[in-house]
Amino acid sequence: MLQGRSEVLIWIKMKIDTSLSMPQLPEALSHAGLHFTVATEEDFDDIMAMSQGIYGGLDYLPTRYSSWLQETNRIVILARKHGKVIALESVVVIDGGETVLVEGLRVAPQERGKGVAGVLLRFCSELVKSRFPEVKVTRLTRDDQLGPKDYQKYRIITKQGILLVRFRAEELKQRLSELGVGEVHSSVIDSSQEAAPLRLDDTTIQRLYLSTDLMHPVLPNATIIQDWQPFKLLSSNMAILLKKDIDWMVDDLANPCVASLCTFPFRVPVGDDWFYLNIDMFGKEESLVRQQFLGHLQKHTSTLKGHVMCQMFLEPQLWETMADFCQHTLGVELVKEYTEQCVVEADMV
């Protein structure tokens, strides 16, 4: 029985490798009941039906799917069974062509635990090697617990704590006003930090991050992580980032200690009038982290109406004090206890 199963798995791998030796991906490739196709706009509804409840309702794909299909350095692949979409994975080439970032992996609930994800990952890996032979490294971001096999397979680039809270935008806006956030002297900001955090324009961003080494000690492993996407400090990556709707903050241009990126809020399928706000925070000075966190909240709650799921990624050592600040000073609800975001990579083989 085991021998027969091994023979099937070997046959599947051979079928994948042979098919991907072709310079172009076939419109549909079949093996063991699975077909692989490049995703199109017409597949959107089927993908959303398969993705119900994924990521606790914080699925970014509904708002990014169309733009993903337009990116020339990205491929979105679907796995089908009997014509029905059962899995998706996206790969995007970054870091000047040296790294492929794996994103969006999902498998339909009824097909989980059957090895579909592994076959899809293998398929996409071979496809990348065929389409982008200059790629040397696969990188991905995870929020699950890494096991012994993961440590054997991957190198850890960095870890950040995940602080997830929820609130009504109107209520938080009122609370921020009561606390004097935005005023020169606020009761929730260390009085020794009088200067407000600086919002950066494109020119200043490029100068600070690319033309100097000032950000290297601030960023984890000299890596910009923006909404789960890790980027090396390269001009090609900065060109990608500057096309996005992001607020960039830093405490000081001459001697930065804390920097942050806030992705503009977007709707998520938790329910009606639910939004997701993502804040990536870098640096260890708690008072400066708090200051920039409040600055991002103030700006974006001023235009939102409804429920907000706000996820901040920060130094693990700051998680507990910032969670306490969110609950007892801001009066927002903590959604879950401490978890970690791990950026990992492995060599393409």
Image: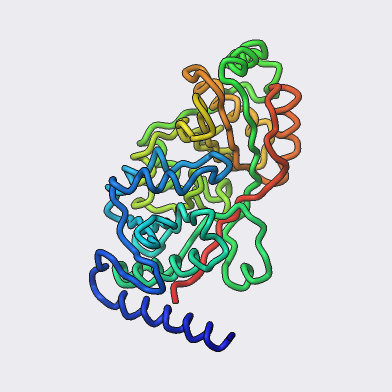
Question: What is the total number of numbered labels drawn onto the structure image?
Answer: 0
Residue 74 percent location from the top left of the image:
33, 55
Quadrant where the C terminus is found in the figure: bottom left
Q: Quadrant of residue 319?
A: top right
Asked if residue 252 can be seen in this view, the reply is no
Residue 169 percent location from the top left of the image:
56, 20
Q: Quadrant of residue 163?
A: top right
What colour-coding does the image apply? Answer: rainbow
Q: Nearer the viewer, residue 102 or 105?
A: 105
**On the rendered structure, is 186 left or right of 270?**
right
Quadrant where the N terminus is found in the figure: bottom right
Name the residue at 49% across, 35% down: 269
Name the residue at 35% across, 66% down: 35
Name the residue at 28% across, 46% down: 42
Q: Nearer the viewer, residue 194 or 324?
A: 324
Q: Check the image and report above or below for 115 versus 101.
A: below
Q: Quadrant of residue 259?
A: top right
